[in-house]
C-alpha cells in the first residue's frame, strides 16, 4: 500500500472532484447545444398548408402529415 499524508490525500481527492465537475459542465453544455441545433433541423413547415411539424427521419425531402404532400426543405410556393 502507498503511504501518503492525509492533507495530500484530501487535496488530491478535492482536485479530482473539481476536474470531474468541470468536465461534466463542459459536456453538458456541448450536448445542450447539439440538441438545440437538432430540434431546429427536425422542424419542417409545409408550403401547401403551412403546417409545422417535426420529422427527424427526413433530411432534404419530407412528407407533410396533414396534407400528405412531399416537399423540399425551405421550399416556397
Ligand atoms: Zn401540408
Image (cartoon, rainbow, N blue to C red):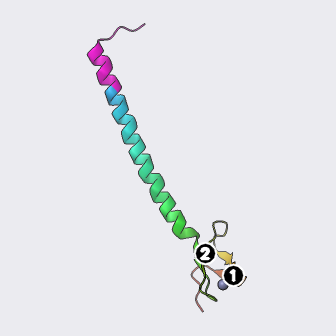
Q: CA distance from mark 2 to mark 1?
A: 9 Å
Split into quadrants, the picture shows ligand 1 in the one at bottom right
Q: Are marks 2 and 1 in contact (CB under 8 Å)?
A: yes
**Disc 2: CA contacts within 10 A as few (<14), some (14-19) or many (>=20):** some
Q: Ligand 1 within 8 A of label 1's CB?
A: yes
Residue 32, x across and y down, in percent: 46, 56
- Look at mark 1 in the image and give the residue it sits on: 66
Residue that sits furthest to the right in the current view: 68
Rendered position, 49 above or below 28: below
Q: 30 left or right of 72?
A: left
The residue beneath circle 2 is: 53
The answer to whether 64 appears left or right of 16 in the picture is right
Quarter location, residue 42: bottom right
- Looking at the image, residue 75 sits to the left or right of residue 34; the answer is right
Q: Position of residue 56 (x, y in %)?
A: 63, 66
Image point 68% across, 79% down: which residue? 64
- x%, y% of residue 49? 63, 88
Residue at (35% x, 24% y) in the render: 13
User: Is the C terminus in the top left, top right, bottom left or bottom right quadrant?
Assistant: bottom right
Horizontal side, residue 3 vs residue 42: left or right:
left
Residue 59 located within the stretch drawn in magenta: no
Give x and y (percent) for residue 50: 59, 86
Q: Which residues are magenta?
A: 1-13
| Residue 66: quarter of image | bottom right
Is the C-beta of the residue carrying label 2 under 8 Å from the nearest atom of ligand 1?
no
Is disc 2 placed on a helix, strand or loop?
strand
Image vertical order of residue 47 relative to residue 63, above or below: below
Residue at 29% from the left image edge and 14% from the top image edge: 6
7 within the magenta span = yes
| Local secondary structure at mark 1 | loop
Amino acid at each position: 500500500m502507498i503511504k501518503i499524508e492525509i492533507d495530500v490525500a484530501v487535496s488530491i481527492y478535492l482536485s479530482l472532484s473539481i476536474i470531474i465537475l468541470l468536465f461534466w459542465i463542459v459536456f453538458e453544455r456541448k450536448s445542450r447545444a447539439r440538441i438545440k441545433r437538432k430540434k431546429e433541423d427536425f422542424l419542417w413547415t409545409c408550403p401547401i398548408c403551412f403546417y409545422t411539424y417535426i420529422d427527424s427521419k427526413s433530411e432534404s425531402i419530407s412528407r407533410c402529415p396533414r396534407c400528405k404532400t412531399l416537399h423540399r426543405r425551405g421550399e416556397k410556393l
